Image (tube, helix red, strand yellow):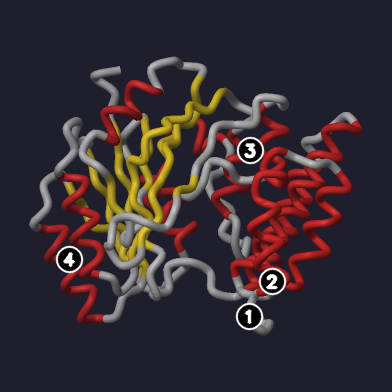
Amino acid sequence: MSGTRISVIIPTRDRADKLARALASVTAQTDPPQEILVVDDGSCAEEAARIAALVGATPAARLLRQERSAGGAAARNFAARQASGEILAFLDSDDWWLPRRLANHRAALASPATMLSYNRAQLTRSGAGTGRGTVGRAPPERWPLRVAIAGWNFVGSCSSVCVRAEAFRAVGGFDPELPSCQDWELWLRLSRRGRFAFLPEPLTFLDVGPHARITTSARAVETGHALVHRRAAAMASSEAEQRYVAAEHLWTLAEIESRFERTRAALPYMLRSLLRCPTQRALKRTPALALRAVSGPRERQG
């Protein structure tokens, strides 16, 4: 695949400082991309000028602009329609990569049967670099890919993913109408088209600092998850598969409640998940989540 073109897609809005770090990590790749598409999703005039200057100073980078903000999903779709690469590599403007990331993903996508590759990602707060855990796991071996990804998003976020452009366009890209979980919903549709390749090395840093990167409303996250779960549930055929998908859905709701410090509200979801189907993920995380639920802070409103 040495001749395969890679297009990097970076949506951003009013984040010139963080974009500079993201772009630096792309230009430092040992296997550099042939194209970097930065989508300014409706930045204010001052930030738009700074973003334009950054892109202009970056080799192989091209600026695309949406006058009105349409959200990250729409921005990625907009860039994907104009990308020339056979592989699309997504990067949020507040995240960054290790230098060998694209080289490793190119190798992972060598098989034509592999539609998507993803790597483990290190969570960090405002560039600290370490200490907040990782996301991205190998698919549960017991289930076929379509069922495993219907259960929960073990792939993680866009910044850890590369996907074949042909497959991305064939399934219609991201669904911008969803309030959250747009990435997971796309992985669901792609799972019907071929294999996923997992790279266990943390090659991406995800910045989870106190800026508006991640959906901050519990209600928006829960609504998005419920909408995607309805689509995911249809991918389970046998009773065992249906129980697994339902149990993982309940467990994810428990983790959402815990993430927003509504830890006591997480308990019913946790117990229902374990009764429905005691999955490996739930059994591993039950002690910590249960401890937080019984001793956590006073509930917050979403």
Quadrant (top left, top right, bottom left, bottom right) of the N terminus: top left
Placement of 105 over or under 19, stated as above or below: above
| Image x and y of residue 18, in percent | 25, 65
Write down the quadrant of residue 88 in the picture. top left
For badge 4, the amino acid type reads: Ala
The residue labelled by disc 4 is 52
* Distance in Å between CA atoms under marks 4 and 1: 44 Å
Neighbor class of circle 2 (other Cα within 10 Å; few <14, some 14-19, many 20+) is many
Foreground mark, 2 or 4, reads 2
Ranked by sequence position, the earlier of labels 2 and 4 is 4
Rendered image: mark on residue 297: 1
Q: In this view, which residue lies farthest toward the left? A: 57
Ranked by sequence position, the earlier of labels 1 and 2 is 2
Marks 1 and 2: CB-CB under 8 Å?
yes
Neighbor class of circle 1 (other Cα within 10 Å; few <14, some 14-19, many 20+) is few
| Image x and y of residue 290, in percent | 71, 61
Ranked by sequence position, the earlier of labels 1 and 3 is 3
What residue appears at the point 69 percent right and 66 percent down from the top-left corner? 222
* Distance in Å between CA atoms under marks 1 and 2: 8 Å
Tell me: 111 left or right of 93: right
| Image x and y of residue 74, in percent | 48, 58
For badge 3, the amino acid type reads: Arg
